[in-house]
Structures are given as C-alpha cells and as structure tokens.
Amino acid sequence: MSVETTTADLVHAALAGSRDAFGSLVESHWDRLVRLARSVVGDAEAEDVVQDSLVVAWTRLAGLSDPQRFGAWASRIVFRRCLRANRRQRGRVALDAIPEPSQARDPEAALSAWQVLARLAPRQRAVLHLTAVEGMTDAEIAPVLGITPASVRAHRRRARAAVARIVRGGGS
Amino acid sequence: MKTLDDEALVQSFEERLRTHARRPGATSASVARTRVLARLPEASRPVPWMRLAAAAALVVVLIVAVWLGSPRPAGERTAGQTLAFAPALGPNVVTWVIDSRTTVYFVLSRDGSETRGVS
C-alpha cells in the first residue's frame, strides 16, 4: 500500500469520526509541519502554531477535496497561521535576532539561518524552506502558499538576492 | 573575509537552513499526537461557511414556499381572469388592465366625443 493511499484512508477514517486515525495523520506530518513553521515564525512559536493548525484542520477536514493531499492542505493551514503569528510579532523578531552585520569580521559565519530568514518576507522564507529543505517543486509549493508557480519563482529569486545582500552585510 | 559570489553565498545559506530546519524539535511526534488529540472538539464538522450557505438556502426556499402558498386577498384576480370576467366590449373599446382591481376602458368614436370609464 502506498503512502498516499494510507494518508487517504486515514483521512476517510478521520472524517468518519476516528480520532485515532487523525492522531496517526498528526504523527506522520508533525515533523515536516514544524520544520515549515520554524522557518516562517521561528522556534519560539512554531510548535504552538502547528498544534493550533492541526486542531483547525480537524474541524475543517470535510472541506478537504482530495484526501491524498492532506499534507499540502495542512501545510497551507500552517502557513496561513504563521502569517497571522508574524503579524502579531512584527517588529519583535528583527530587534531581537539581528546583529549589526558590519560588526562581524565574517558576516556569513556570524549570521544564523534564522537571523537571515527573519529579514525576509514570510512568503520568501516559506519558498526558500520548501525548496531547499523539503525539495518541493514550484508546482507543489504554489498551492501551499496560495500563489501561482510563476509567483513562487519570483519570490525565490527575490529571496535569494536578499539573502546574498544580507550575508554580505548590506542589509535587506 | 571570504570573497564568494552571490550564488555560493546563497548555496552556503541554504545548507545552513537545512541544518537549522532539521534539528530535532522540542516535542516529539508521539507527544504532539497526544496533545493535539486532547484539544480536538467532539467531531470533525463541516466548514462554517457551508453550514451558513445551507441555512441561507433553506430560508430562501421557505420564504418562496410561504409566498406561493399564501391565499390571495378576496376578490384579487389575475389579469387573464379580469379579462375573462369583463363585459362584452364593442370593437371601438380599448381595455387597459392596470392590475387585478383596476381596468381602464377607452371608447373611441369618430365624432370626436370620447367616453372613458374606470371599473
């Protein structure tokens, strides 16, 4: 039995009211969803955001049109709640996390991955994450972020230019 | 200071991003399962907008059904019924049915005199 078939079976069982089946979905997608949330909102809020998102996913499960795509659908819920969390924490991250690049002798080594990510727009963080960490294609990323594949490419191009600028010490 | 071009800088960053993202989380998947299940409401429900749309459609159907089924006021007739009950008219009479209770008659004559009436 393929992974997709198993996911679809679990979704159908969860729709029929099986909390155990939904628990299995949570367990199999938890790590990947937390990785995404970490890259978009940072460590401090990532797990809370994913937990909230999965509770929302349970209440909206009937709206999932293709049960085999539970992972992408749940990722989209997580991403949207990350955007909401970002709006709440706007301004705090940049002040807490980012040192003055010009003070570092080796800017590349001085900046952690999150310190660079925190200077990017949330969609740029997500695109870089889904590309570099999850190895997803533009067509797979697009529905997660609710944008077109062409927009995914544009976000990635701008994100990479911004990363190079930040790492060199030029700011965002 | 390193003199890497932009592409190398980005590749190096993406490598650090992979390492950063793949660190083990504070909560394991099995613990997360327990926590999420403890927070679930009783049952998976249809999305709220679907229920709202269904309720709105039901209200519309009820309003239309009540309107169609309600008795008409006594004496009220359709335009066709009004004409069916109208007295026999001459060829020089024009009838104008405004509504079920109001019919206007125009009587045309050659000598310029004109008779009008409202029923």
Image: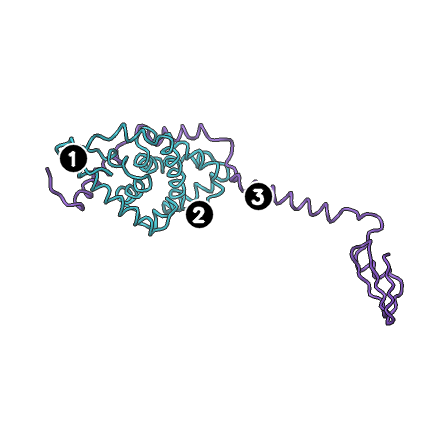
- Looking at the image, the residue that sits furthest to the right is B87
Instruction: Say if A15 sits above or below B90 in the image.
Output: above
Foreground of the two, A24 or A146? A146
Q: Marks 2 and 3: which is nearer the front?
A: 3
Secondary structure found at label 1: helix
The residue that label 2 is drawn on is A66
Q: Where is residue A21 in the image (x, y as percent from the top left)?
A: 44, 37
Look at label 3 and name its amino acid: Ala
The residue that label 3 is drawn on is B53
Q: Residue at x 66, y 46 (%)?
A: B61
Q: Marks 3 and 1: which is nearer the front?
A: 1
Q: Which image quarter holds the N terminus of chain B?
A: top left
The residue that label 1 is drawn on is A107
Residue A56 figure quarter: top left
Badge 3 and badge 1 in a common chain: no
Q: Is residue A100 left or right of residue A154?
A: left
Number of other residues with Cα within 10 Å of mark 2, as a class: few under 14, some 14 to 19, many 20 or more: few
Residue A118 figure quarter: top left
Per the rendering, the colour in which chain B appears is: purple
